[in-house]
Image (cartoon, rainbow, N blue to C red):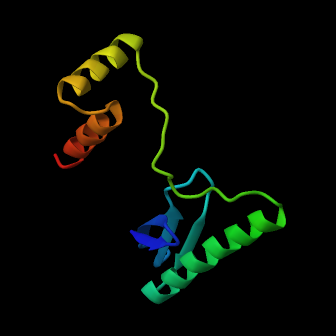
Amino acid sequence: MMIYKNYVAQIEFDEEADLFHGEVINTRDVITFQGSTVKELKKALRDSIEDYLEFCKKRNEEPERPFSGKFNLRLDPELHRNVFIVARKHGKSLNEWVTEAIRHHLQE
């Protein structure tokens, strides 16, 4: 993984081409890059993100930013009610309880 301006990239190595390939994974927009050395790869990531930001600016579009920390979750109404009740029993808001549950499962 590599990070530039909060954009997170996943890297893979292609043995046949003898190249590293990277893709930004925390946006829906496609941002890719490649390099044959770590130094080239870092520069290619920076250049790709800067090109993306400049492209958006020229089009007067807001670039997609890495995750804001907010997301909508659709639940069956019964499950929504049950989660709310469990959260209240633990003296937590629904947001606090769900955040803790997610963190717990990420540590498994």
- Between residues 85 and 71, which one lies in front from this camera angle? 85
Q: Nearer the viewer, residue 56 or 94?
A: 94
Position of the N terminus by quadrant: bottom left
* Residue drawn at (53%, 72%) of the image: 5
Asked if one can make out residue 16 in the rendered structure from this viewpoint, the answer is no
Q: Quadrant of residue 82?
A: top left
Image vertical order of residue 74 relative to residue 41, above or below: above
Q: Residue at x 58, y 66 (%)?
A: 32
Horizontal relation, residue 57 to residue 97: left or right: right
Quarter of the image where one finds residue 80: top left
- Name the image quarter holding residue 34: bottom right
**Percent position (x, y) of residue 12?**
42, 67
Q: Is residue 87 visible?
A: yes
From the top left corner, tell me how far across and down residue 62 is, in percent: 72, 57
The x and y percentages for residue 37 are 45, 86
Q: 84 above or below 22?
A: above
